[in-house]
């Protein structure tokens, strides 16, 4: 735990050293996210509610999504681009040390733009009047998005593609339902955004829990399911890992 804390401090010092670049990235992400906030207000401009969901509910769901994902990729920023080390065979630095290779990879850097996600998410939650009960659920959202990132990079043990487009396709394919409430789907597809691609479980569902309309148990079960999936995929992926020197030899 001491090593984890020291590594996080070092990452923050590095971000502070490149202050101008860090601030530009934070500001850019906030502007990007504000576009979606504006879209929410446009949707509800002439609608008092949408399928029983008010603009306040929708803002809280989006704020929860931003805060959870932003915190995950701020603390474990190395996961966002970890696929490059896997595909290019540059994992030796993590595999030869006593600490967990996954933890080392996750903590190798922070993503400054994700700080913007987190800050705006907290701001949106505060402005929309989020209850303390909803704020208390943020660690669950943080955990779920972290597990999705682990699943995403673990997939690269099995595919040979280093493009960010493919990484984004996997991660945002899983989390895309964070922006869309499940009630717009037909009944047979409603499990999709909660279990298989669990974006709604870390956005709309916590809002329902905070309002007393849903139980915490399904969220815990989905977390356990994705934890098993993420770590099994990582463990099996490590068995397939090929160092760069082996790749060069094969070529």
Image (cartoon, helix red, strand yellow):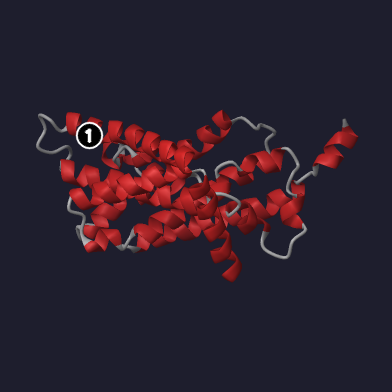
Q: Position of residue 21 (x, y in %)?
A: 48, 38
Task: Tell me the quadrant of the picture where the N terminus can be found.
Answer: bottom right
Left or right, 25 with reference to 84: left
Q: Nearer the viewer, residue 35 or 232?
A: 35
- The correct choice, above or below, for 31 with respect to 152 in the image is above
Label 1, secondary structure: give it: helix
Labels in figure, total: 1
Q: Residue at x 63, y 46 (%)?
A: 154
Give the labeled residue for mark 1: 40
Quadrant location of the C terminus in the rendered image? top right
Is residue 214 among the parts visible in the rendering?
Answer: no
Does residue 160 appear to the left or right of 225 in the view shown? right
Name the foreground residue: 110 vs 210: 110
Q: Position of residue 217 (x, y in %)?
A: 36, 63
Q: Position of residue 92 (x, y in %)?
A: 77, 51
- Is residue 134 visible to the viewer in this orientation of the structure? yes
**22 to the left or right of 90:** left
Which residue is drawn at the image coordinates 69% and 43% (left, top)?
86
Residue 232: horizontal and vertical position, in percent?
63, 55
Identify the residue at the far right of this view.
249
**Residue pictured at 29% horizontal, 40% vertical:** 181
Neighbourhood count class around disc 1 (C-alpha, 10 Å): few under 14, some 14–19, many 20 upward:
some
The image quadrant of residue 62 is top left
């Amino acid at each position: 735990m001491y090593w984890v804390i020291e590594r996080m401090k070092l990452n923050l010092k590095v971000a502070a050293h490149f202050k101008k670049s860090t601030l530009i990235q934070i500001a850019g992400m906030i502007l990007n996210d504000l576009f979606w906030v504006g879209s929410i207000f446009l949707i509800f401009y002439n609608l008092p509610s949408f399928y029983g969901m008010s603009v306040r509910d929708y803002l809280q769901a989006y704020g929860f999504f931003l805060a959870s994902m932003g915190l995950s990729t701020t603390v474990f920023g190395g996961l966002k681009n970890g696929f490059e080390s896997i595909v290019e065979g540059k994992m030796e630095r993590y595999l030869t040390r006593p600490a967990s290779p996954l933890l080392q990879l996750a903590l190798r850097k922070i993503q400054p733009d994700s700080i913007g996600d987190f800050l705006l998410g907290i701001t949106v939650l505060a402005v929309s009047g989020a209850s303390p009960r909803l704020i208390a659920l943020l660690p669950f959202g943080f955990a779920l998005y972290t597990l999705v990132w682990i699943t995403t990079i673990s997939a690269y043990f099995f595919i040979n593609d280093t493009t960010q487009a493919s990484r984004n396709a996997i991660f945002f394919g899983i989390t895309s339902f964070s922006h869309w409430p499940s009630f717009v789907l037909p009944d047979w597809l409603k499990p999709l955004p909660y279990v298989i691609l669990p974006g709604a479980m870390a956005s709309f569902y916590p809002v329902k829990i905070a309002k007393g309309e849903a139980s915490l148990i399904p969220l815990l079960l989905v977390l356990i399911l994705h934890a098993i999936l993420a770590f099994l995929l990582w463990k099996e992926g490590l068995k397939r890992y090929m160092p760069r020197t082996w790749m060069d030899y094969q070529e």
